[in-house]
């Protein structure tokens, strides 16, 4: 299972403040900590104001890319910032997060994904209100898969985010997500599924407990990747245990290795 480390996100106050003072050492250490805790990609989001993001996203790429062994996930809805970041990116693999089923987003993101051979996250959203039902989301998923194929991008490079909506707004949203996830895996076996896990608990007390339970359920329904905080030891312990229980960990070696390294928290 791919872990996309979420901590370098300008919506977080410490990240925003470090960006303002251009604290290179802060970001290098933040990236290294996440890599050491098992991340496969480092997500970087510099989105504050549009003009600043255009400068900050490529600056972050330059700061981090040579300091970690793992690739980066460029998280931006700013087309110019994304283009500039891709131009300075030197690693062989990159992930773009994200595009939606809106025509303008497809035209803005997929040519870049094709040019750079990037993995790309497609969010099950279109114009208008958020899709509420499994059927609505699967219709959007079909549009995302079709768009990728139209641009000659292999389905194996597409990660679909079925859309995590907080259960605090509708207690059925967790179940709707899981059923959508199940249908994606059944109908599009070459496509992988990803999500921003912590959205499920927004506005609720004891958010980390809900996140852990939701991660276990999502893995059981076929989740391939998650945008999470790898420094959350309890969450990572649940991930290792669930993969072992679901037969996704050959000879349970990842679980055993995590135990030997003292990374399992009970």
Image (cartoon, helix red, strand yellow):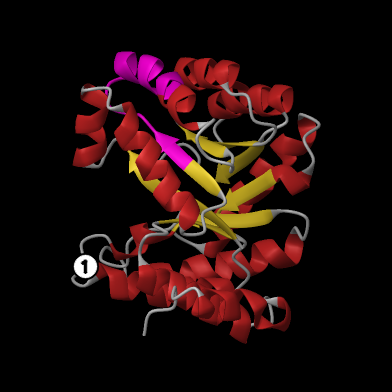
Q: Check if residue 46 falls in the magenta segment.
A: yes
The residue range painted magenta reads 43-59
Q: Answer whether residue 255 is visible to the viewer in this image.
A: yes
Residue 261 shown left or right of residue 59 in the figure: right
Residue 204 shown left or right of residue 33 in the figure: left
Q: Is residue 120 above or below residue 194?
A: above
Q: Answer whether residue 125 is visible to the viewer in this image.
A: no
Q: Which residue is located at x 38 percent, y 79 percent?
A: 265
Residue 100 shown left or right of residue 93 in the figure: left
Q: Which residue is located at x 61 percent, y 63 percent?
A: 1
Counting from the top left corner in percent of width and height, residue 144 is at: 65, 42
Mark 1 surroundings: few (<14), some (14-19) or many (≥20) residues within 10 A: few
Q: Which residue is mark 1?
A: 204
Q: Nearer the viewer, residue 130 or 46?
A: 46
Counting from the top left corner in percent of width and height, residue 73 is at: 53, 38
Residue 162 shown left or right of residue 52 in the figure: right
Counting from the top left corner in percent of width and height, residue 174 is at: 42, 70
Quadrant location of the C terminus in the rendered image: bottom left
């Amino acid at each position: 299972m791919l872990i996309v480390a979420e901590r370098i996100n300008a919506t977080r106050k410490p990240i925003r403040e470090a960006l303002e003072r251009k604290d290179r050492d802060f970001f290098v250490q933040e990236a290294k900590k996440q890599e050491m805790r098992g991340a496969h990609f480092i997500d970087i989001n510099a989105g504050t104001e549009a003009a600043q993001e255009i400068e900050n996203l490529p600056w972050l790429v330059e700061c981090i890319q040579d300091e970690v062994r793992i690739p980066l996930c460029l998280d931006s809805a700013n087309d110019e910032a994304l283009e500039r970041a891709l131009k300075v990116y030197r690693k062989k693999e990159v992930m773009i997060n994200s595009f939606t089923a809106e025509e303008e987003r497809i035209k803005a993101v997929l040519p870049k994904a094709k040019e750079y051979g990037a993995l790309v996250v497609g969010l099950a959203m279109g114009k208008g209100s958020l899709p509420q039902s499994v059927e609505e989301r699967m219709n959007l998923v079909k549009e995302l898969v079709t768009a990728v194929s139209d641009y000659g991008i292999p389905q194996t490079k597409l990660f679909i985010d079925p859309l995590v909506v907080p259960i605090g707004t509708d207690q059925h949203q967790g179940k709707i997500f899981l059923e959508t996830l199940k249908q994606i895996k059944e109908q599009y076996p070459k496509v992988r599924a990803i999500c921003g896990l912590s959205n499920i608990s927004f506005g609720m007390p004891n958010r980390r407990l809900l996140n852990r339970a939701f991660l276990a359920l999502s893995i059981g329904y076929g989740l391939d990747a998650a945008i999470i905080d790898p420094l959350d030891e309890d969450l990572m312990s649940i991930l290792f245990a669930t993969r072992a229980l679901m037969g996704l960990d050959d000879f349970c070696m990842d679980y055993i290795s995590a135990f030997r390294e003292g990374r399992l928290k009970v």
